[in-house]
Image (cartoon, rainbow, N blue to C red):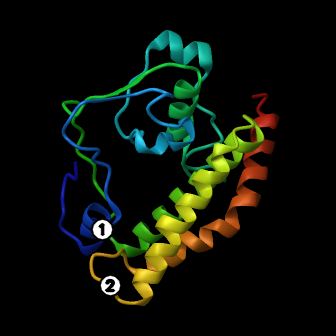
């Protein structure tokens, strides 16, 4: 939940972009209830826990798929993907509440959402190229059509309750960063002896 909603950027992220909340009902996710490439719908890495043995056995977190890397985001999504793809269950417990401080200014929010979009598509490329999961193509096209292009069209038309056009344009521009970010991410992992 948002720890504060004091700026326009924080309100935009929470109410227009969607924030991090996933509802108030417990949920269970398996590969039969959600396609593993749609793992972003499970939740965000701001508050998660894993069984220690599973974490160590699977080496869940690709260190080159997160904040501070060329991919900029999606380490949590990739971990969720791998858990679901391996046949395990993910439980969402709304009682495990964490207060998140959203970006306070619009420029930081624009940069963050661009990074999230880069991370999303680097994650999907990894699913396609390394895991041979063709569902990644469908997920990428769905996100492009129903999120990016829809928000662009609604923003151009001045529709209410649509994320600001600057956010959508930044996300779209992030698509240009994806091939280079993916290649740099793979190279870094190879150098680190993944």
- Location of residue 31 in the rendering, given as x and y in whole percent from the top left corner: 51, 28
**Between disc 1 and disc 2, whose residue precedes?**
1
Left/right placement of residue 4 relative to residue 107 reads left
Q: Which residue is mark 1?
A: 16
Q: Is residue 71 visible?
A: no
Looking at this view, is 146 or 48 the one in front? 146
Q: Which residue is mark 2?
A: 159
SS state under label 2: loop
| As drawn, 43 above or below 108 | above
Q: Is residue 137 visible?
A: yes
Mark 1 nearby-residue class (10 Å; few <14, some 14–19, many ≥20): some
- Location of residue 20 in the rendering, given as x and y in whole percent from the top left corner: 32, 49
The residue depicted at 22 percent of the width and 34 percent of the height is 94
**Label disc, if present, on residue 69 of the rendered structure:** none
| As drawn, 13 above or below 26 | below
Q: CA distance from mark 1 to mark 2?
A: 12 Å
């Amino acid at each position: 939940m948002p720890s504060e909603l004091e700026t326009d950027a924080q309100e935009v992220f929470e109410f227009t972009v969607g924030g991090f909340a996933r509802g108030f009902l417990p949920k269970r996710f398996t590969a039969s209830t959600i396609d593993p490439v749609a793992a972003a719908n499970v939740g965000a890495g701001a508050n998660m826990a894993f069984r220690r043995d599973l974490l160590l056995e699977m080496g869940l977190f690709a260190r080159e798929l997160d904040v501070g890397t060329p991919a900029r985001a999606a380490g949590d999504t990739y971990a969720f993907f791998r858990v679901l793809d391996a046949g395990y269950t993910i439980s969402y417990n709304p009682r495990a509440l964490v207060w998140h401080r959203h970006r306070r200014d619009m420029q930081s929010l624009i940069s963050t959402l661009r990074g999230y979009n880069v991370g999303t598509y680097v994650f999907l490329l990894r699913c396609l190229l390394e895991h041979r999961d063709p569902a990644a193509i469908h997920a990428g096209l769905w996100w492009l059509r129903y999120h990016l292009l829809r928000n662009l069209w609604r923003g151009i038309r001045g529709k209410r309750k649509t994320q600001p056009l600057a956010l959508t344009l930044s996300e779209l521009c992030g698509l240009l960063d994806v091939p280079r970010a993916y290649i740099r991410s793979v190279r870094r992992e190879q150098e680190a002896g993944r």
